Amino acid sequence: MTTPIRFAVIGTGYRARLFFAVAAALDDVFEVSAVLPHHPLNERDRRSIAVPVVRDLDELLASGPSFVLTAVGHDATPQLLRELVDRDTRVLAETPPAPDAGSLRALWNDVGSSRLVQVAEQYPRHPMTAARASAVGAGLIGTPTSALVSMTQTYHAVAIIRTLLGMGRVGAVVDARTHTAPLVSPFSRAGWTGDGQEHPTRTTVATIDFGDAIGRYDFTDGQTRNPLRASQVVVRGSRGEIVDDSLTRLVDDTTVVTSAFERRQLGLHRDFEIPTLDQISYEGSVLYRNPYPLARLSDEELAMAELLRDTGRWAVGDGPEPYPLAEAAHDQLLGLAITRAATTGETVRVGREAWSE
């Protein structure tokens, strides 16, 4: 796009500030037209926000955004989406779009047909996840039959699993169990904790049986930021498998090869370029290329930037829907099924919904 993508934000919390930071790092690509706080700001917080702060929705929309990002709690999100859709406004809603199955269905009933709501699910866009999905899509492991994701919680993990399997919005049978074990948590959202003590910590393990393929979920509370728990991804297919950063495949009747995904990082050793990710390749083919190599963004920020970019293009009719409400609703419903199965010990069946294919 030749002019910056203008978007407005409702909310000033942790997630909103991450989007502010991405927009500031790419100020030639994005412009935050205004922000509407969801809660009263003190003077220090108001001064720390380097974009116009408005008092109500009318002022926010008058700032001329292509779309509005709602970065508020999931309890408040559904009503905000209704108000914005009533004003014929395109929206990018933070995850999840609603807190429970009933509110998801009610939200879809009210706004689903508008096609005005996208959801800020960034995890499938993380560079390595995108590279793995590209390899699967290219048929390198044949037909994908199962995917294990041990990285992030419920609906985020479901989004990754469905992306890696190429799985649509279909029904599933969900089983889950939990166990508690001691674990040190040296790092949190606030930074290093300084706590070296072991604390009882829950792990949830689940299977999501889609019929033609199975998703496997494994998540320890706090794992996203705990350096003592690595992310693990395994995608198995009819002709090979991906295990974390390597891919094993059958290349002819008697030859099996294993090769690594190569992450080319700039700014290392005698490389005087800006420290950043350049590309991820496999056996000489580039599977992911950083669209913003001059911005020094983390993988999370790159995923957020691509989501903002694609939402901006969609908002002006220049691209497809980046992650429509139907996809997010299905991810959340399956995530809720994992929680319910883990809590009750019962099998949970997710059937056809109004947003299903």
Image: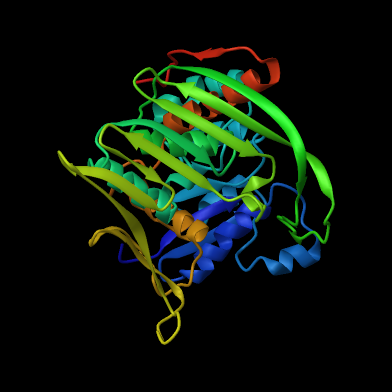
**What is the x, y in percent for residue 132?**
36, 48
Q: Residue at x 51, y 57 (%)?
A: 300
Front in this rendered view, residue 285 or 45? 285
Quadrant in the picture for the N terminus: bottom left
In this image, 277 relative to 317: left or right?
A: right
Residue 51 seen from this side: yes
Residue 144, percent from left and from top: 32, 33
Q: Quadrant of residue 34?
A: bottom right
**Farthest-out residue, left:** 252
Q: Is residue 120 visible?
A: no
Residue 72: image x %, image y %? 65, 43
**Residue at image x 36%, y 35%?**
236
What colour-coding does the image apply? rainbow
Residue that appears at 45% across and 79% down: 268
Q: Up-down: is 197 above or below 201?
A: below
Count up the numbered dots.
0
Q: Residue at x 50, y 70 (%)?
A: 25
Screen quadrant of the C terminus: top left
Q: Nearer the viewer, residue 96 or 220?
A: 220
Q: Is residue 78 left or right of residue 292?
A: right
Judge whether 59 appears above or below 48 on screen.
above
Outermost residue, front side: 254
Q: Quadrant of residue 211?
A: top left
In the rendered image, residue 112, in percent from the top left (x then y), is placed at 44, 26
Q: Is residue 272 above or below residue 215?
A: below
